[in-house]
Amino acid sequence: MDQGPKCNMNMLFTWDTTDLCIVFRGWHISGAGSLVFSLLAIVLLTAGYEAVREISRRYEDSTRKLACEDTSNESSSLLGPGRNGGRNEEQQTKIIKAILYAVQVFYSFFIMLLFMTYNGWVMLAVAVGAFVGYLLFSGASSTKTVACH
């Protein structure tokens, strides 16, 4: 019975790519070409994580600005027009934020699994991907603020 490629699991740092499988048995490094292709894929995957983070930041910023505008435009009346619509929008916003957060958590753990191959080439590809992703997608500071302006 053919069980697929043999995967070498290292628990110590190495540069060796002999029988290296990356996360899945099917993602097997069989030579220099597959190594280069895999490293480029890892760079793109890691850069994609930065894109997801930026999307989350922009969504949160846009909802924060809307919330700040709504509170500054409200009258002193407790029962202003459209109060129920506001609650539905708040719930929808919270669900979208939770989805974006879950995607980030899943993505970050997947990147951690890549790093845990303990292979120097894969680790470098993750770092390069983070660098490229930050350059391409991060338009704001990496710190968050709760200010409305």
Image (spheres, rainbow, N blue to C red):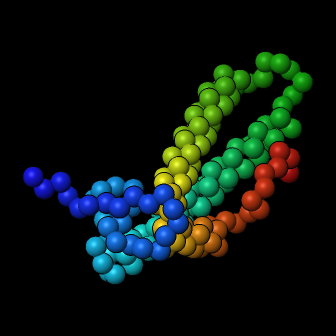
Quick check: 83 above or below 24? above
Identify the image quadrant of residue 82: top right
Q: Residue at x 47, y 74 (%)?
A: 15
Compared across the picture, whether 97 is left or right of 113 comes to right
- Give me the residue at 67% from left, 65% from top: 138
Horizontal side of residue 119 vs 75, given as left or right = left
With 133 as the anchor, is 30 left or right in this view?
Answer: left
- Name the residue at the right extreme: 76
Residue closest to the eye, 47 or 111: 111
Say which of 112 and 102 sits in front. Answer: 112
The answer to whether residue 136 shows anywhere in this view is: no
Q: Position of residue 31 (x, y in %)?
A: 30, 78
With respect to residue 45, does 79 lie above or below? above
- Residue shown at 69%/47% (left/top)? 60
Q: Is residue 58 at least partly visible in the picture?
A: yes
Residue 130 drawn above or below residue 23: below
Front residue of this view, candidates 2 and 141: 2
Q: Residue furthest left?
A: 1
